[in-house]
Image (tube, coloured by chain):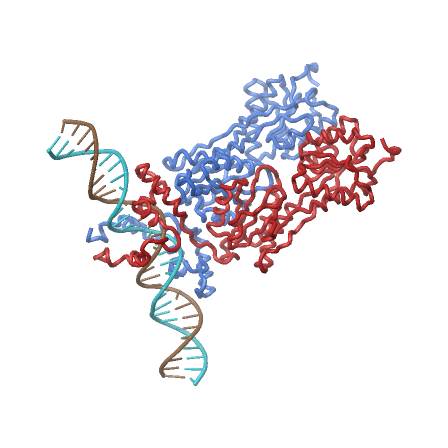
Chain colours: A red, B blue, C cyan, D brown
Amino acid sequence: MSEPTELRDPSAASRRRKPSAKPKGRVTMTDIARAAGCSQATVSFVLNNSPGIRLSQQTRDRVIEAARALGYSPPVFSALRPPVTPFEGLDGVIGFAVDQLATSPEAVVAIEGARQASWNAGNVLLVAQTMGDALMEPRAIAALTRRGISALIYMTIFTREIAAPEFLYSLDIPVILLNCYTADYAFPAVVPSEIAGGQSATRHLIAHGHRRIGTITGEPWMQAAQDRLKGYRRALATADIPFDPELVVEGDWSASAGYAATVKLLALKDKPTAIFCQNDRTAIGCYEALKEAGLHIPEDISVVGYDDEEIARHLFPPLTTSILPHLAMGQWAIEQLETPPVPGRGRYPITKLECPLVERESVARVRDRGAAG
Amino acid sequence: MSEPTELRDPSAASRRRKPSAKPKGRVTMTDIARAAGCSQATVSFVLNNSPGIRLSQQTRDRVIEAARALGYSPPVFSALRPPVTPFEGLDGVIGFAVDQLATSPEAVVAIEGARQASWNAGNVLLVAQTMGDALMEPRAIAALTRRGISALIYMTIFTREIAAPEFLYSLDIPVILLNCYTADYAFPAVVPSEIAGGQSATRHLIAHGHRRIGTITGEPWMQAAQDRLKGYRRALATADIPFDPELVVEGDWSASAGYAATVKLLALKDKPTAIFCQNDRTAIGCYEALKEAGLHIPEDISVVGYDDEEIARHLFPPLTTSILPHLAMGQWAIEQLETPPVPGRGRYPITKLECPLVERESVARVRDRGAAG
DNA sequence: CGCGCGTGCTAATATAGATTAGCAGTGTGC
DNA sequence: GCACACTGCTAATCTATATTAGCACGCGCG
């Protein structure tokens, strides 16, 4: 305790064994200090931005640069080893990364589903937004994984195939994809069954006697738009109704496009008796055009929407529409964590969840208005 | 430099002063060890669930219980002290705890505001839900603090005074309250200026010539309801219009209450020429009752709402209403982190942010309908 | 010129948690 | 009844970071 410098410092000794190279495992402040040519204390001051400490900008810059070059990250304590709850009573944490929270309510609904399912097991859900930003995404997810999460739910706001960021593959925890999937089926994934949804919406109209059914699509490059249209065609085919391209008008999910498309449909010689709007916003515009044309919903013409947005039940008349199953998808994602730790390797099938139709008052039996036109 | 122990160690000395009591600031593993009657090492083993270590279940339980009782949370290293980025390229993480995400859109809006403000500085926002659950809340927040957040935003969905959970006081990071505040003003807090909002909504009606202005309140125990009513009275007083209790009908924020209350107002001998609905849902019910009574909005009667929910712009006619400033509140919260590290102690004033009125088409100049009804 | 002082930094030390070695007790086989 | 191993734990040490005290240097000033 009294003749210091040589005695204590086995670390220096052990370090001497490895003369120069990368200092074993993690990068420490001492490593940074060496690289920046200053003391560990200085590094600590800089990285913590300690108040009341005066350092030259030069030194700060050198330290920061060295830290970045060496890839420093703060120490990780107690990073919950096995993905199951580390121990009863202290929390298991499940990460939920989504590209956007604010633009549409679906993300929140899925989170709610996941939360409900997690709650029972006493797990806490931590949500991060990636904003689809290649720079922020790794950071946001690192903020989750850094301290040890037991699983990661990765959600996109639009249903689509994604090229999963590389680092998703090297996480040593289960990763579940929500509302998206990868071409290599490397992760369990769940999406809404939009084809079935489009089909049952259309079938619902057919069941009410409609045979001339117009549809207004979304932006055609979007998966959801393609699938809903596919469902529409299937329902028609199943009922032996020939597909008429005239009855399909391209929209872009917006109310104004819905208005324009409806006008177009009403200009047809052989007008539709029902319109399947492939989302609720489109239906808003559709309603407006129909009302302007002096048509009553549903007596003169039936309408169904898709998405069951809040607004759907406040329209007049309330809109029959398909519910996006994001709540169930969130629950499903959590349930996956409980069952199989990890089967072989990759090759997970994509799970599709039903979009149930909620019937309100915008659909009626077709009236016999004489033949066409 | 050579006879140490007494010289250096003012800290040990100061600790000696407090022989037993709470060991100063954070709870350490040593504290837990003392409480559980075992060694710090044992605590470390238990809390880390260290593999290859055998301990009796009894001991584990004792440790866990003590840890929970004392409110242990792992140390936070280099958690970027001033919430500005510690240094370029490494992420600062800011925690955002809210009681509920799903029930109303405001939480998401506030988060969006906070995210935007954080983004510039390169900080990542991590969101946890507490569900107002005394058991889950500490866990959810622990999940945040555990991973070394640089600051915590604590939000409630309803504007109100809260008794902040004890552990908020012992966090060694800045804590900002959003949409709530504590009686002791221990944290910076921001809430909507509901009084001013109620006042300007009412003033808007007065400016359009209205003097008989009915109002439908929210649930009276809620802060927001009281404040909006207070604003209503202030506007009246300012314009020298006597307050008439008849014109105030108690609602409960719901559309059906809005309907009932409107019916009641219309039954008055001296009917109002305008109604201030203290939220948009109430206004929905109000609209309905007015239309049923054959009154046209705004020609026969003017209506303003509050909250600017999505639905407000889809009503017919579109509803004039006050915008809840949750986006700005989220931004404000983040901005607070940049300016003052910590003023003296406690005593932060409550900041109130304006609720701007968005004018749509539900308000018109009062018509001269002869004297009273 | 030499004193005082602010600046920029380091040495030394404090602290918290992780880890290693090993000790006491308790069986157990023979 | 002794060698041996196994269980359950602690003492001691180690690592990484935070913090305190103070050193060296330059500079203005009387």
User: Do we see residue B60 in this rendering?
Assistant: yes
Query: In this orientation, which residue lies closer to the viewer: A342 or B273?
Result: A342
Query: In this orientation, which residue lies closer to the viewer: A7 or B209?
Result: A7
- Which residue ends up furthest to the right in the rendered image? A370
Query: In this orientation, which residue lies closer to the viewer: C16 or B184?
Result: C16
User: Is residue B51 toward the left or the right of residue A56 in the image?
Assistant: right
User: Do we see residue A113 in this rendering?
Assistant: no
User: Is residue C22 toward the left or the right of residue A101 in the image?
Assistant: left
Q: Is residue A321 above or below residue B63?
A: above
Query: In this orientation, which residue lies closer to the viewer: B348 or A270?
Result: A270
Q: Is residue B270 above or below residue B67?
A: above
Residue at image point 46% right, 49% down: A146
Q: Is residue A83 above or below residue A155?
A: below
User: Is residue A109 toward the left or the right of residue B68 in the image?
Assistant: right
x and y percentages locating residue D8 in the rendered image: 43, 67
x and y percentages locating residue A336 in the rendered image: 60, 54
Quadrant in which the C terminus of chain A appears: top right
> Residue D11 appears in which quarter of the rendering?
bottom left
Quadrant in which the N terminus of chain A appears: bottom left
x and y percentages locating residue A56 in the rendered image: 30, 37
